[in-house]
Image (tube, grey):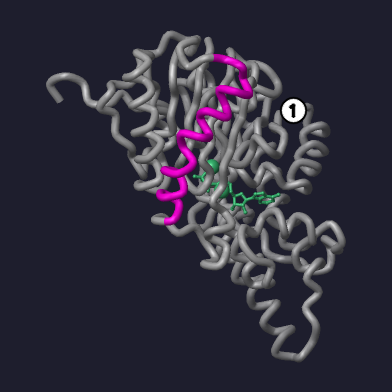
Amino acid sequence: PLVLGIETSCDETGVGIVRGTTLLADAVASSVNDHARFGGVVPEIASRAHLEAMVPTIQRALDTAGIKASDLDGISVTAGPGLAGALLVGVSAAKAYAWALDKPLYGVNHLASHICVDQLEHGRLPEPTMALLVSGGHSSLLLTADITTDVRPLGATIDDAAGEAFDKVARVLGLGFPGGPVVDRRAREGDRKAIHFPRGLTGPKDPEFDFSFSGLKTAVARWVEAKRRAGEEVPVADVAASFQEAVTDVLTRKAVKACQQHGVDHLMIGGGVAANSRLRAMAEQRCERAGIRLRVPRPGLCTDNGAMVAALGAEMVWRNRAPSALDLSADSSLPLTEVSVPGHQHGD
Ligand code: ATP
Ligand code: MG
Ligand code: FE
């Protein structure tokens, strides 16, 4: 199936086009620079930027793919979770195109899309697959089979998401926003054993597959503050590397354990934090040792994009799933177990 997918849940206007599991176009316009001086994404600015970028980005994707909109078998769009106003721009655009072109519309979950995107890189996901979803707003271990219907949470963060911790630590270190990519870069020059930061929820009585990163973030902030108070220079690269080591150690340890305990031999890592170079390297080592096959999309497909939404849309069509109704609405807090959104059926 040939599907166009639209993503507007945060600050990226993404439009992807896929044929089955083949990526034909992945156009992204980001408003990230407009938010930088506020130290975080400003919803109103994001919505306005989506409105301006929407039609040109769709056109760019169609041109790159070399197809006509009338060739499409369906249109998919992120229905949630995300910023309400931002989601609304994508959902409205998707509805307008679906209606005008008379194509089926699929409102899908942003988080399931972060998993499904791997099909564009490594072919269809094995059933079952363990998924470690690590992004700006989520950190979860999920057991999946059919990705269009089956996403079973085994554990999640009880406080901050992994990406949020990267962003906050970057702010403490004065590295700017978004923090993940800069911390990753600076950590390469640092000693990851320089400072031992706490590994949250790894005690014998702690929940096995839940995460906690807020204590780690506080420990880093305290450590940096103490250095500054003592008038000493903060070894930014060492702090970045040691912090990153603590996050990736816990994530990979729990992911491998979840695979072993559930007898699953395929691990997929998705979401923005999956772009992290140390996480990728450590996961590779630990999975190899445990006899687990690892699947991680290339970094550009880990962060938000339209291709991931198109990938899940194509899977919906391929599996003959019912399309959404045209009065579909965005749901900013869509639970991750709801892979697609039906829209309001007649009589609701
Ligand atoms: P969600 O998917 O939970 O709704 P989101 O869409 O805002 O949240 P993503 O775009 O999936 O999040 O990921 C963004 C997050 O990934 C940010 O917190 C960012 O700092 C982090 N990130 C991006 N690249 C890296 C990297 N190389 N290392 C660590 N973190 C990274
Ligand atoms: Mg973003
Ligand atoms: Fe995301």
Residue 208 seen by the camera: no
Residue in view at x 47 percent, y 31 percent: 6
Ligand 3 image position (quadrant): top right
The residue singled out by tag 1 in the image is: 292
Q: Is residue 56 magenta?
A: yes
The verdict on residue 257 being magenta is no
The quarter holding residue 195 reads: bottom right
Q: Is residue 334 above or below residue 175?
A: above
Q: Looking at the picture, does residue 205 appear above or below residue 62?
A: below
Compared to residue 301, the image places residue 125 above or below, namely: above
Question: Could you tell whether 157 is left or right of 89 in the image?
Answer: right
| Residue 176 position (above or below residue 70) | below
Give the main secondary structure of the magenta stretch: helix
- Horizontal arrangement in the rendering, residue 185 relative to residue 21 (left or right): right
Occupied quadrant, residue 260: top right
**Residue at the (55%, 46%) spot, across then down:** 139
Residue 345 in view = yes
Name the one closer to the observer, 122 or 150: 122
**Residue at the image point whose x is 54% and y is 51% from the top:** 31
- Residue that protrudes farthest toward the left in the picture: 347
Q: Nearer the viewer, residue 281 or 64?
A: 64
Looking at the rendering, the stretch of residues picked out in magenta corresponds to: 45-67
On the image, the x and y values in percent for residue 44 come to: 39, 56
In the picture, the quarter occupied by the C terminus is: top left
- Give the image location of residue 166, x and y in percent: 64, 58
* Few, some or many residues within 10 Å of mark 1 (<14, 14–19, 20+): some
Q: Is residue 69 left or right of residue 65?
A: left
Q: Residue at x 62, y 37 (%)?
A: 270
Q: Nearer the viewer, residue 206 or 10?
A: 10
In what element is the residue under mark 1? loop
Q: Nearer the viewer, residue 229 or 48?
A: 48
